[in-house]
Amino acid sequence: MIFLKTEDEIELLRQSNLLVGRTLAEVAKMIKPGVTTAELDRVAEEFIRDNGAIPTFKGFPNPNGTPFPASLCTSVNEQVVHGIPGNRSLRDGDIVSVDCGVLLNGFCGDSAYTFCVGEVSSEVKRLLKVTKDSLYLGIQNAIHGKRLGDIGNAIQQSCEAAGYGVVREFVGHGIGKEMHEDPQVPNYGRRGTGTLLKNGMCLAIEPMITMGSRQIYLEDDRWSVSTRDGKCAAHFEHTVAVRHGKADILSSFEFIEEILGDKSI
Ligand code: MG
Ligand code: MG
């Protein structure tokens, strides 16, 4: 069942999502060779709680019943999503996808950004740029009267044209009082098909794009998802409200990119 949000609810969702953006900016300040993903997680959790919110990922169960142990997902290089923060130190040339979710005033925020650690190859930077651009191409289709397949198709077409893989097993989602609501929002699809988009639908759109094959596997920790071929993957996510004429992006990369400056992708 898809819940359409009222204007007041959309503003609450915006507050939650802006907090996610500001949390990711705190993470951005720390990204450099030598930092561990556990350190990123500790700072993020503290920032979320200091702002009166709850990290929604912490304790979130997966289909195996294993609760997620941290506040951020930190997925390094070949990890696509759901990487568990730990004592892995980031190294010069790595990329790390950081996904963050909060619950504030009863509404969820969810957004993700892939960061470069030190100097990253131009090949990998291109993966990040194409993935981020595809997110905005998807968002351009999150308007009243279009269909879900229009969002997925825009993402898929642009990423596959660049020679990349589009992960099928994990998708975006509706968002509101719950982090994951209906509908599912695939990053692939056919134009003009799928659920009709309506003003007030709130969606987390999140392309997960691989440099090589789109085949993935679940690591032994039962959470981390990695590419089978070991090639890098990128993940960018915004929460948006479907509107007449133009989507309203409720999350923000502005805080992050203020920190990254001319190192922004
Ligand atoms: Mg997310
Ligand atoms: Mg999400």
Image (tube, grey):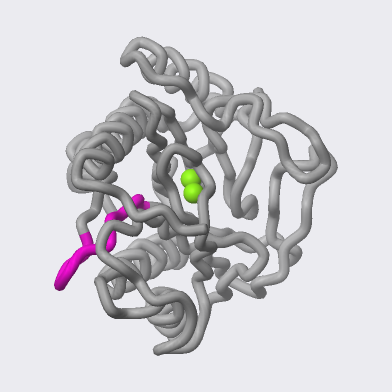
- Residues in magenta? 238-247
Q: Position of residue 220 (x, y in %)?
A: 84, 42
Foreground of the two, 175 or 66: 175
Q: Quadrant of residue 260?
A: top left
Residue 31 percent location from the top left of the image: 41, 32
As rendered, which of 23 and 9 lies closer to the eye? Answer: 9
Magenta-drawn stretch contains 239: yes
Residue visible at 75% across and 64% down in the picture: 228
* Side (left or right) of 70 relative to 206: right
Asked if residue 28 lies in the magenta stretch, the reply is no
**Outermost residue, left direction?**
245
**What secondary structure is the magenta-colored segment mainly?**
loop
* Among the 4 quarters of the image, the one containing residue 123: bottom left
Query: Relative to 6, is 229 on the left or the right?
Result: right
Residue 49, compared with residue 217, is above or below; it is above
Residue 175, given in percent of the width and then of the height, sits at 43, 48
Q: Is residue 34 left or right of residue 246?
A: right
- Above or below, 257 relative to 173: above
Q: Is residue 59 above or below residue 109?
A: above
- For the image, the number of numbered tags is 0
Q: Quadrant of the C terminus?
A: bottom left
Residue displayed at 56% across by 37% down: 73
Residue 96, visible in the rendered structure: no
| Displayed quadrant of residue 75 | top right
Q: Nearer the viewer, residue 9 or 210?
A: 9
Specify whether 229 is left or right of 92. right
For the point 52% across and 66% down, the residue is 209
| Residue at x-position 53% and y-position 69% | 186
Q: Position of residue 107 (x, y in %)?
A: 38, 34
> In this view of the protein, can residue 27 be seen by the observer?
yes
